[in-house]
Amino acid sequence: MKKKTERVSFQGEKGAFSQQAALQLLGPAIEVVPCQRFDDLFRSLENRTAGAAVVPIENTLHGSVHENYDHLLRFEFPIVAETSVRIVHNLIAPPGVPFRAVRRVYSHPVALNQCLKFFERYPELVREPFYDTAGSVKMVMEERPEGVAAIASSVAAGIYGGAILKSSIEDDRQNFTRFFLLRRPEDVPPLAKVPAGKGKWKTSLVFTLKNMPGSLFRALGAFALRDINLAKIESRPLRGKPWEYLFYVDLIGRLDEPRLNNALGHLGELADFLRVLGCYPQGA
Amino acid sequence: MKKKTERVSFQGEKGAFSQQAALQLLGPAIEVVPCQRFDDLFRSLENRTAGAAVVPIENTLHGSVHENYDHLLRFEFPIVAETSVRIVHNLIAPPGVPFRAVRRVYSHPVALNQCLKFFERYPELVREPFYDTAGSVKMVMEERPEGVAAIASSVAAGIYGGAILKSSIEDDRQNFTRFFLLRRPEDVPPLAKVPAGKGKWKTSLVFTLKNMPGSLFRALGAFALRDINLAKIESRPLRGKPWEYLFYVDLIGRLDEPRLNNALGHLGELADFLRVLGCYPQGA
């Protein structure tokens, strides 16, 4: 019953790195629904303006996107896939503008800060903070201010018709952002009907533990003693209980494997609260 | 050899919640050194413009201040004390301005968002985002715009001579921020010379583990198997090694207790990297 063109929401302007993640996850035959804020992204599933949402969850330089961990708990939309995007920054200007004419460079402050070596090499360039990377290309292409370029993805250059003057100007090539694809629970087929295939799977959980010595050690034992690998652990504050925490973990394995199922039963004995956030093929 | 009036740095304007933490940690006989950004705060120790720095590390609603975890690793200034401050927001205006005259309320967006019930009760009040809570009181007191009030701490009201029109207007009373006090290593007396006293102590560590199944479980075992309580764990990305993590832990215990010392030796066998960030009395 799927429509041919699915509506997929992400945060940021068209051409954001999230749109590249959407392409990797769902291919080019999608209709994009840009959202201003992360909570709008989750609401786009709630109010059915989108059928799927692409949510950044962690970056290898900056760490987790903690706000989205909180939203995962609150909105209860299952994770159905993951992917990671290498963050490549490019200097983009209207076609015909030569590099030597560029005086000011607009982009999101995080992107500007990720190209410090480039700015050291060209100290005459003035950095101008802007609300969004792709948005800075949009502005440069629409308003064409003299001597102005933007820093953003090649997808953004393509969408707004900008020319790439310098490519891959980021300081650190080990800069990746991991994204989750979320859907409404009723749109997710039961796991039993999804073939496991050849690749690995991941299962994401969130839980709280009784506040007692060794409780986290025992909880992780539910996995370690069954040789289940923990890919990530993240702690978030538990509202209303100062200095107590929620734990989010990503496990390697599929929920319907007996050892994972047993581990969840074991964790359930130790946890005050436990929820599966999703079970999905490990992304590239 | 201590001077009578110590210079203590914190982030924000005078009257910030960090200043309240400084008062709790060191008493009123200090000279405050406000800093604009968190890295300025660490640099104030480096360039000796301050003898101690007060650093927010986590909030019970918003979670860890991750940037400061990164700075703790980079700057290597030991943690010598901790304290927590309850975040109480007050509506503050110049003396003589009645509540009914207030139309617009300035404060940091986080503070405005923490007083949503107050704004629901008085829907005619317009929220105006400002760069700083204490800074909003300073502005209101200096410029005296008509019908304008600010939301900030009672310390800020006192410093700038504002009157508290409504006190404790925050939605959630379980809103605490925990602060570390940092000093230069050469200004910290050896632990052997510091009496343990009657209260508990905490020891903070940062470490990385070999990327193998069960490594975090085994690392936490170094503590759990010795009945050492883990008060907090935080993970941060490891730069240059995508999808690997640094772990920051706070343990209950003093570094010179044999079982803690043994646990550190045990953890050292499992860790690729291990550093003690500080050993300090548990704060109130």
Image (spheres, coloured by chain):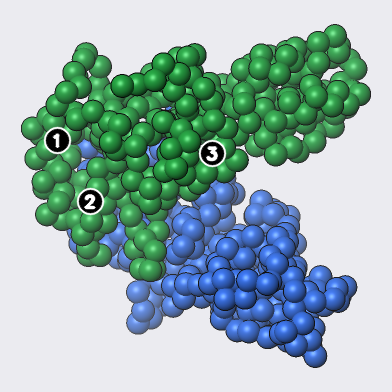
Chain colours: A green, B blue
Answer whether labels 3 and 1 touch (C-beta < 8 Å).
Answer: no
Q: Residue at x 72, y 63 (%)?
A: B128
Image location of residue A111, percent across then percent down: 66, 32
How many neighbours does mark 2 have within 10 angstroms: few (below 14), some (14-19), or many (20 or more)? some
Q: As displayed, is residue A145 above or below residue B76?
A: above
Q: Quadrant of residue B116?
A: bottom right
Nearer-N-terminus badge (3/2): 3
How many neighbours does mark 3 have within 10 angstroms: few (below 14), some (14-19), or many (20 or more)? some
Q: CA distance from mark 3 to mark 2?
A: 27 Å
The answer as to whether the residues below labels 1 and 2 share one chain is yes
Q: Look at the image and tell me whether residue A238 can be seen.
A: yes
Q: Residue at x 49, y 58 (%)?
A: B62
| Residue indicated by mark 3 | A62
Q: Mark 3 or mark 2: which is in front?
A: 2
Image location of residue A157, percent across then percent down: 69, 17
As shown in the figure, which amino acid type bears the numbered disc 3?
A: His
| Residue indicated by mark 1 | A260
Q: As displayed, is residue A84 above or below residue B82?
A: above
Q: CA distance from mark 3 to mark 1?
A: 30 Å
